Image (cartoon, helix red, strand yellow):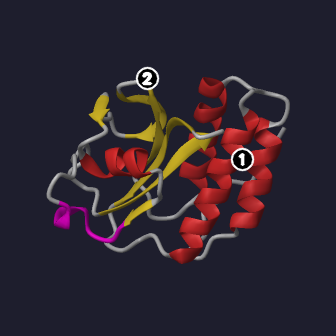
Amino acid sequence: MSFDVTPTTDAAVDYAGLDASARALLDGESDRVANAANLSALVYHALPHVNWVGFYFFDGDELVVGPFQGKPACVRIPLVRGVCGAAARTRTTQRIADVHAVADHIACDADSRSEIVVPLVRDGELIGVFDLDSPVPNRFGDDDQAGLEAIAATFVASLR
């Protein structure tokens, strides 16, 4: 099985194509770790100007790092702190143009300048978050948010 993960040369991304690749990659597999690992790699290699792509899973108390691509990450994130915590707590996507402007931002990679975090929710229950960081300020726009939310929904739908 082959997936085109050639990054684009600019910030424009074919998210419909990327989501189709994600669907094909996850087809027939329901293990969350396996799917999160493959999806992290797919998205990391497909998107330009990202330095971290991965998952944090909710353990009933806090977010715990799952599969990812990038530098080593913070292992545990309380729901009351940081961008990931805010996404999990509010169950709304957090799109941050400048992470240095967020008072309680948790800096796992000092090179990160912007971030987008999509909550993973199924049947009202928090599963975790899908987190992307970029060394470029204001890297994530409306198209990125819609595309990444669709990919996150593909991940959630793959779980049984």
Give the amino acid at mark 1.
Thr
| Residue 29 appears in the picture as rendered | yes
Tell me the crowding category of disc 1: few under 14, some 14 to 19, or many 20 or more residues within 10 angstroms, Cα based: some
- In this rendering, the answer to whether 128 lies above or below 115 is above
Q: Secondary structure at mark 2?
A: loop
Q: Which residue is mark 1?
A: 154
Residue 101 in magenta stretch: yes
Q: Which residue is mark 2?
A: 59
Give the number of the mark in front: 2 or 1. Answer: 2
| Residue 3 appears in the picture as rendered | no
Give the amino acid at mark 2.
Asp
- In this rendering, the answer to whether 12 lies above or below 72 is below
- In this rendering, the answer to whether 122 lies above or below 6 is above
Residue placed most toward the observer, 40 or 8? 40
Measuring from the top left, give residue 107's x and y in whole percent.
Answer: 21, 47
Q: Say left or right for 104 vs 116.
A: left
Which residue is at 66% across, 39% downward?
123
Measuring from the top left, give residue 23's x and y in whole percent.
Answer: 79, 46
Which residue is at 75% across, 26% downward?
160
Residue placed most toward the observer, 89 or 7? 89
Farthest residue, direction left:
103
* Quadrant housing residue 127: top right
Residue 139 in magenta stretch: no
* Quadrant housing residue 37: top right
Q: Say left or right for 118 vs 31.
A: left
Q: Name which of mark 2 and mark 1 comes first in the sequence.
A: 2
Measuring from the top left, give residue 54's x and y in whole percent.
Answer: 48, 41
